[in-house]
Image (cartoon, rainbow, N blue to C red):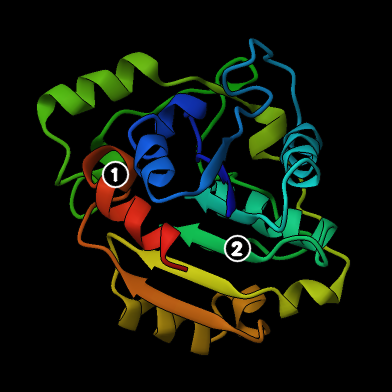
Amino acid sequence: MDIVMVAGLWLDGSAWDAVVPELESLGHRPVVVTLPGQGDGSTTAGLDDQVAALVAAVDAAVEPTVVGHSAACTLAWMAADARPDDVARVVLIGGFPCADGEKYADFLEPVEGLVPFPGWEPFEGPDADDLDEQARRRFEAAAIPVPESVTRGIVRLSDERRFDVPVTVVCPEFSPGQAREWIDAGDVPELSHAAQVELVDLDSGHWPMFTRPAELARLIGSL
């Protein structure tokens, strides 16, 4: 199957480099999206530009599974909203989609119009426990400041057919039980309304594409 993949904040398409060959070995066609403002040299791209890039990849794929990581879980869900008849499944890794009218990722202060990687302090604990010092240094060196116009962009969702698209939530630094509690409590309203939500465990931190690429590929490829 075609698998369209988009990584979270500060990451470009190279985040999936260790996952791509694993998916190919399983007979799938991975399609990696490098987002405007996160690897294309632009510092002025907005959230709409990122959504457009992802939707273009969906349009060029065949019955794709759309995989979003972290903040980009919202992008994957927005692609399902834009193309509910074309997206076969949405896979959300380590995150949940924002609701209509919310800001995309407005939890860090921008610096001169950009949101740089804030260092590891906000992620100490389960998020980053499985990243050794070498992996952390590689991440820091490759991290791309994200335009404020992306992080403070307003999420727009309009087609209720998105709720019929099957969803798989990959639970790395949190458990499926925790995810179910949040969904049932209404903390994730988009998934509370979704018709089919599967929760699967993955023993890793927040960036399993770096620390558990083979396991992540097998999980995605089995859906």
Residue placed under numbered mark 2 in the picture: 90
Q: Position of residue 166 (x, y in %)?
A: 62, 75
Among numbered discs 2 and 1, the one appearing first in the sequence:
2
The amino acid sitting under disc 1 is: Pro
Indicate the quadrant containing the N terminus: top left, top right, bottom left or bottom right.
bottom right
Q: CA distance from mark 2 to mark 1?
A: 18 Å
Residue drawn at point x = 84 percent, y = 56 percent: 82
Q: In the rendering, which numbered label is found on residue 213?
A: 1
Percent x, y of residue 107: 52, 45
Q: For the point 61% across and 54% down, which residue is it?
A: 66
- Residue depicted at x 74% and y 53%: 79
Q: Is residue 39 above or below residue 52?
A: above
Q: Is residue 141 visible?
A: yes
Q: Nearer the viewer, residue 86 or 140?
A: 86
Horizontal relation, residue 206 to residue 37: left or right = left
* Label 2 element class: strand
Farthest top residue? 41
| Callout 1 secondary element | helix
Q: Which mark is residue 104?
A: none
User: Which amino acid is tagged 2?
Assistant: Val
